Amino acid sequence: MRARTVALLLAGRGAGRLAQYGAGFALLAVWGPDEFAGYAAAVGVGLWAFALAATGVERSALVTLAGVGPADPGRRALEGMFAALGLLPFALSLAACAAAGLLDPGGAAPRYAAGIAFMTGTGALAVLVALLRLRGRPGADPAAYAVLSAGYGAAVALAALAGFGAGGVLALLIGVTAAIVAVLLAVLRPAWRGAGRAAVLAAVRTGGLFAAGDVLGNAAVSVLYAELAALAPAAQGSLLYVGLTVSVALGALSNYVLRLWQPAILVWLAADPAGSPARVRRALVVAGGAGVVATVAAGLAGHLVVALAVEIGTFLAVSGAAFVVESIDDRARLNSALSALAGLGVVAVAGLLLIPGGGAAGALVALAAGWLARVPWLFTAARRPAAPAPRADTASAPGGPSRPA
């Protein structure tokens, strides 16, 4: 992918992220902490659903379609399958949102259902723009996120000028997202039949393995918030929120770049099935050793900024290695998912030990320890593929290695 195209994509996605975070802080200022807490909680509970689509389905599509040429007669059927898998959670959550509004009008259930619907909608959006990128239409990505950014701006304006509460803002954002998804579908025009039952089952299995790391990572953060609420002053939770905003923003940027490079990563792994994983193992040894030293030092220092820097460093290094490892085969993806489960356990235990004395800084050190706990599993998973690797002759595929990033 050409550097100019990558810069355009990063600018569009970055603007979307800035709009999301900026809208959050603006809504906090307009509403105050009580109303904003309802909005934040509603969106927060939908993070796992976003991960299923944006991480699971999108990465499964990137891996599968990288080896299918643009003229392949079965490609549009595969696009339709992945589009349907991305849209299904959105459709189900919209139905649940409508049912909750009828059964409990004015209660908390409709707000939480709306939060989940918005997050599944943005997940479907991520899948559709990825399919269009692979088809050679990368401009759909920044255009879609520019419209979503405008939606955030409109939500803040209506909250400030028209008194929209959390429910009204979420309804507006759902409407904007649904409109974007409808336009993207009209542009994509996928074939809705022909993929076959075996392909669907394989995509669901692979997507679930891809999504496991993000789902369990979000669960680890939720555990830390619960431990902070029980073991530390309330202000420490706000400090963790601010720190994780920085960490998540950098992580989202890194993960997006890796997704743009996914076809090239597959080719790199296929070109040297034994040597490429060996390089990943060496990188894991270096990152793990440096991470252990830095995490111990951060724990002893007890300083929030130091802990945040260490957490971000371990997060970027280990999550980047996990991305490459998960590109090998389903066996490696399973080991990565198990590593995320081990990381969740370490975070929970480390949080109990570090939060009472360290507060938000202790929570960040616990997160870093959780990332480091994944290293041995990922090291084991970084092996020659058990099945034949994706072909190295995918240069004709959109976004493939004929246009290196």
Image: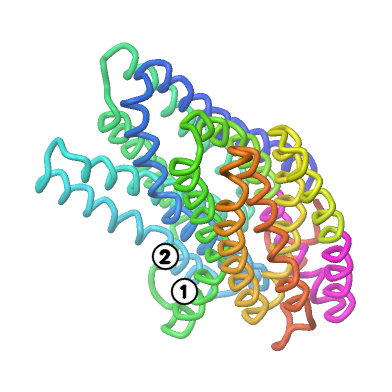
Q: Nearer the viewer, mark 2 or mark 1?
A: 1
Q: Position of residue 275 (x, y in %)?
A: 90, 77
Q: Which amino acid does the dot numbered 2 rest on?
A: Leu
Residue 384 falls in image quadrant: bottom right
Residues 127 and 238: in front is: 238
What secondary structure prevails in the magenta region? helix
Residues 336 and 56: in front is: 336
Relative horizontal placement of residue 323, taking residue 209 as reference (left or right)? right
Residue sitting at 34 percent across and 14 percent down? Answer: 160
Residue sitting at 15 percent across and 43 percent down? Answer: 101
Q: For residue 10: magenta? A: no
Relative horizontal placement of residue 193, taking residue 214 as reference (left or right)? left
Q: Position of residue 307 (x, y in %)?
A: 72, 40
Whole-angstrom CA distance, mark 2 to mark 1, is 8 Å
Residue sitting at 44 percent across and 61 percent down? Answer: 83
Residue 204 circle label: 1
Residue 85 circle label: 2
SS at circle 2: helix
